[in-house]
Amino acid sequence: SDAIGATARAVGSLVDAQAAARAAEAEREALGARAKASRAEIEASLVSCVGAIVDAARMGDFSRRADASTDLGALAGIVHGLNDLTTACDDFLAEADEALARLAGGDLGARMSDRHEGRLAAVARNFNDAAGALGGAIGEISTSVGATRGAAMEISASMRDLSGRTEAQAASLEEIAATVEEMSKTASQTAKVVDGAAASARGTSSRASDGAERAKEAVTAIDKIEAQAGKIVEIVGV
């Protein structure tokens, strides 16, 4: 009977051990299922956060940020890194947009800061170099325009002076022509007076006084011609 009891107890212990083993296996399977479900939930949350930021960035919107909740565990570092990336891009684009707007508005002193890194820093330097070169080129153009304006003003002044001289010369020529015409008339009249005086001189003594008078008129006419000739000399000298 003792042997039978011992055997029965051994069998009971074995059954209990098997039951305990089955229970432990069921618990492990349940824990694995819960862990798998939790991981799937975390991955879905991560994909949702990252996907929204990536989609917005693809459309040119770098202002979106993801909420790195504690449920993500170690994967929250990915979300933090992505937020930092979009922040850097958003800040760079905002500064570049402001600098370009200032440059478009005529501010040739517009420059970007040197706080950016990597490729963004290279783009900022290129912008600054381009803005500096543009400012230098426009400065040279402004200088050339100023010199051209000065030369144009000098030419305009010379043309006005030439025009004035031409008008003065034209007036002088008209005056000379009028004087020459008057001299011609005076010379004709003088010739007539001289001819009359000669005829009177050849006449009788009763007409001697008339010849003297005509001779006086001839002398006066010759003096007048001499004065007119002097006037022409003065006009030509001007």
Image (cartoon, rainbow, N blue to C red):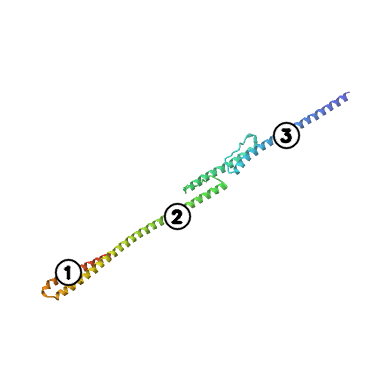
Per the image, label 1 sits on a secondary structure element best described as helix
Per the image, label 2 sits on a secondary structure element best described as helix
Marks 2 and 3 in Cβ contact (< 8 Å): no
Residue 61 picture location, percent across and down? 58, 42
Q: What amino acid type should be assigned to the residue bearing mark 2?
A: Ile
Per the image, label 3 sits on a secondary structure element best described as helix
Front one among 7 and 196: 196
Q: How many residues crowd around disc 1 within 10 Å: few (fewer than 14), some, or many (20 or more)?
A: some
Specify whether residue 78 is in view: no
Mark 1 against mark 3, which lies toward the viewer? Answer: 1
Residue 19 picture location, percent across and down? 80, 29
Q: How many residues crowd around disc 2 within 10 Å: few (fewer than 14), some, or many (20 or more)?
A: few
Residue identifier under label 1? 217
Q: Say which mark, if any, is on residue 141.
A: 2
> Going from the N terminus, do you reach mark 1 or mark 3 first?
3
Rendered residue at 16%/70% (across/down): 214
Q: What amino acid type should be assigned to the residue bearing mark 3?
A: Ala
Residue 103 picture location, percent across and down? 49, 48
Q: Is residue 1 above or below residue 96?
A: above
Front one among 201 and 39: 201
Q: Is residue 12 above or below residue 204?
A: above
Specify whether residue 101 is in view: yes
- Residue pushed farthest left? 206
